Amino acid sequence: MNKPLQRGRPERPRRGSSPAQGETPPDDTVKKLVRTWNQGKVENIASLFAADGTLIIPTGTSIQSRSEIEKMIAEKGLLKETTLSNTVDEIARPDAETAIVKGTYQLEGIKILGFSTSATGFYVLRQIKQEGRWLISRAEVNRGNKD
């Protein structure tokens, strides 16, 4: 059975080991992140990170730990009236307990000085499997193109 294509882009070849039959694929974490972002659920976004996870935002600032990530997202009001969309371009599985998911994103509805704008960029999520769940151990979010 073929997987549906995301946003009209062909699925890219995956490297490394394949997920076991019936296992949740690592890109499901990205889908949950986008869905919970668009629902405005800060605590649910933070729960997708490992307890000692790291989020590196486009300014280069590094936020350490699930609780600090939740606090930063809530304090900055990042979810308010914004819509996040993404593509998954590549999934690598260096081993059975690690996945690296790369893709692009677009964040629309950002309010700056009363004007609405959008931001686009790319991300790299390093995920680890803990108790059968894929959790983000390190997320790097960048603006602009990969090249």
Image: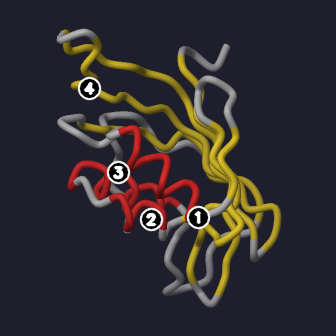
CA–CA distance in space, label 4 to label 3:
12 Å
> Dot 1, crowdedness within 10 Å: few (<14), some or many (≥20)?
many
Which quarter of the figure has residue 94? bottom right
Amino acid under label 2? Asp
Label 4 – label 1 distance at C-alpha: 25 Å
- Please give the label number shown on residue 143: none
Residue underneath mark 4: 108
Q: Residue at x 50, y 24 (%)?
A: 121
Q: CB under 8 Å between callouts 4 and 3?
A: no
Q: Is residue 39 visible?
A: yes
Q: Of label 2 and label 1, which has the lower sequence position?
A: 2
Q: CA distance from mark 3 to mark 1?
A: 17 Å
Towards the viewer: 10 or 45: 45
- Foreground residue among 139 and 111: 111
Q: How many marks?
A: 4
- CA distance separating discs 2 and 4: 22 Å
